[in-house]
Image: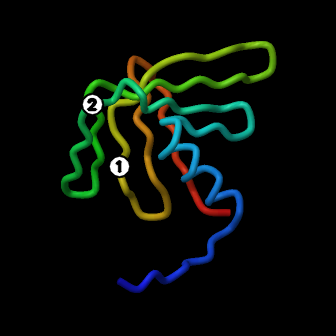
């Protein structure tokens, strides 16, 4: 077997390492916890989590806690549908 190293940005590596080893990713006071997730289904650009992943965010003096059930790939970004919220998020490259 031949091992081939792939170089990536340190921040991306640390997030991937944390996800695989701990089941969580934290960035700038926001965290997503995949430890409750038992099943991940991917179909037609949608990744669905069963049960939902937990997210937390500190926005000034307010601490938010909720869940997300799916991520959707869209042109220009990844939509995060926040459960029980009228506000959804979109991840975009800088």
Mark 2 is surrounded, within 10 Å at the Cα level, by few (under 14), some (14 to 19) or many (20 or more) other residues, namely few
> Neighbour class for label 1 at 10 Å: few (<14), some, many (≥20)?
some
Q: Which residue is mark 1?
A: 72
Q: Residue at x 43, y 32 (%)?
A: 34
Question: The C terminus appears in which quarter of the rendering?
Answer: bottom right
Q: In the displayed structure, does residue 54 sit left or right of residue 61?
A: left
Vertical comparison of 90 with 82: above or below: below
Across and down, in percent, residue 93 comes to 61, 62
Element class at badge 2? loop
Q: Nearer the viewer, residue 72 or 24?
A: 24
Residue extending furthest toward the front:
1
Residue 40: x and y in percent read: 26, 41
Q: Residue at x 48, y 46 (%)?
A: 20
| Nearest to viewer (mark 2 / mark 1) | 2
In the rendered view, does 93 fall on the left or right side of 36? right
| Image side of residue 12 versus residue 39, left or right | right
In the image, which disc is placed on residue 46?
A: none
- Taking 65 as reference, is 91 above or below it? below
- Kindly check if marks 2 and 1 are in contact, taking CB atoms under 8 A apart as contact: no
**Which residue is labeled 2 in the image?**
38
SS of the residue under disc 1: strand
- The quadrant the N terminus occupies is bottom left
Residue 69 horizontal/vertical position (percent) = 33, 31
Taking the spot 74% from the left edge, 38% from the top edge, the residue there is 28
The quadrant holding residue 48 is top left
| Residue 82 percent coordinates (x, y) | 44, 28
Mark 2 or 1 closer to N-term? Answer: 2
Per the model, the C-alpha gap separating discs 2 and 1 is 19 Å
């Amino acid at each position: 077997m031949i091992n081939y190293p792939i170089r990536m940005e340190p921040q991306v590596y640390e997030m991937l390492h944390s996800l695989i080893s701990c089941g969580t990713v934290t960035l700038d006071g926001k965290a997503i916890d995949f430890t409750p997730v038992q099943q991940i289904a991917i179909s037609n650009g949608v990744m669905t989590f069963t049960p939902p992943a937990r997210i937390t965010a500190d926005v000034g003096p307010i601490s938010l806690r909720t869940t997300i059930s799916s991520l959707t790939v869209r042109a220009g970004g990844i939509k995060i549908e926040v459960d029980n919220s009228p506000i959804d998020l979109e991840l975009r490259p800088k």
